[in-house]
Image (cartoon, rainbow, N blue to C red):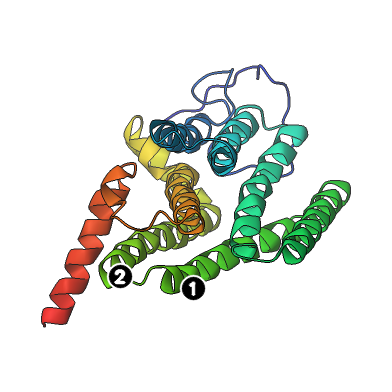
Amino acid sequence: METVPVVPFWGPATSYLNFCEEDYVITRFVAEFINTFSSLIFIIFGIYGLLQLHRKQQTGFRSISYLGLIGVGVCSAGYHMTLKYHTQMSDELSMHLLTTPLLYRILTFKASPERTRLVGIVLSVLFTIVMVVHMAMDEFLLHASSFGLAVYMIATRTSKIISQQVPDPYFRKKLRNISFVGIFCFALGYTVWLIDDWACGYLIKTRHAVGLPLAFLTELHGWWHLLTAIGGYVAVVLVDLVTTGEVHEDPTAQLAWPIPPAARFIESMTSSTKLK
């Protein structure tokens, strides 16, 4: 896959992060082609979730988290398409705009009005501090660590609420299988994100050797988008289900692909392990 010099439509990159995908290889209008279009997966999952809520006639505040998924996709695509500093900031801001409402819902579940207000104030202050420091100081550690902590809290707290709110062992197992899909995708996504950074030189050489379209398969940041989109969608679905009390039936079949077959695969694996 040869790199042909082009005049970037968006001008020189001003973002301080630039991932392993070579810039403006496919078209002068998109800096990172795969990273841009793989970001649209977040939008697809968000729209699917909104359509499911509309079908149930239960939109309103429950739409916020699915709109957050769409926002992540839009901002991520804008960032990878332009590689500008302000679009990078919007991308990183959108990640916290997704996790903060989820944290608010699980931390205020069945809480008193006083605790609910306190949690809202604390999360708002922390969100403001993280983003102001991040943008003013051009630092990455606080942003990354606070996002990772938020994901951890969402996962652990949701698991605890599932144990408390779902007495039926059958439905509880179904929800846990779904949560395992999300956790696995987040973990695998983070792994390929690290490999994309550590092995970038080797990946670029491989792309040049195999050419298009096989070279697209080595764009590991695009796989990170796919895997974290699945994990993010699972998180939104589970938080929405357990905090609204919709745990009286198996939700697996209603979820977007590939969650249903993945959850059934986990169930078959755990069942076969128990039989042994």
Q: Quadrant of the N terminus?
A: top left
> Which amino acid, mark 1?
Lys
Q: Which residue is mark 2?
A: 168
Q: Nearer the viewer, residue 262 or 112?
A: 112
Q: Which residue is mark 1?
A: 160
Q: Nearer the viewer, residue 270 or 159?
A: 159
x, y (%) of residue 28?
58, 18
Q: Is residue 11 left or right of residue 269?
A: right
How many circles with numbers are drawn on the protein?
2
x, y (%) of residue 141?
73, 61
Q: Is residue 21 left or right of residue 162?
A: right
x, y (%) of residue 247?
37, 58
Query: Residue visible at 16% across and 72% down?
Result: 271
> Which amino acid, mark 2?
Asp
Q: Nearer the viewer, residue 101 or 224?
A: 101
Q: Quadrant of the C terminus?
A: bottom left
Q: Residue furthest right?
A: 136
Query: Residue visible at 49% across and 69% down?
Result: 161
| Snapshot quadrant of residue 92 | top right
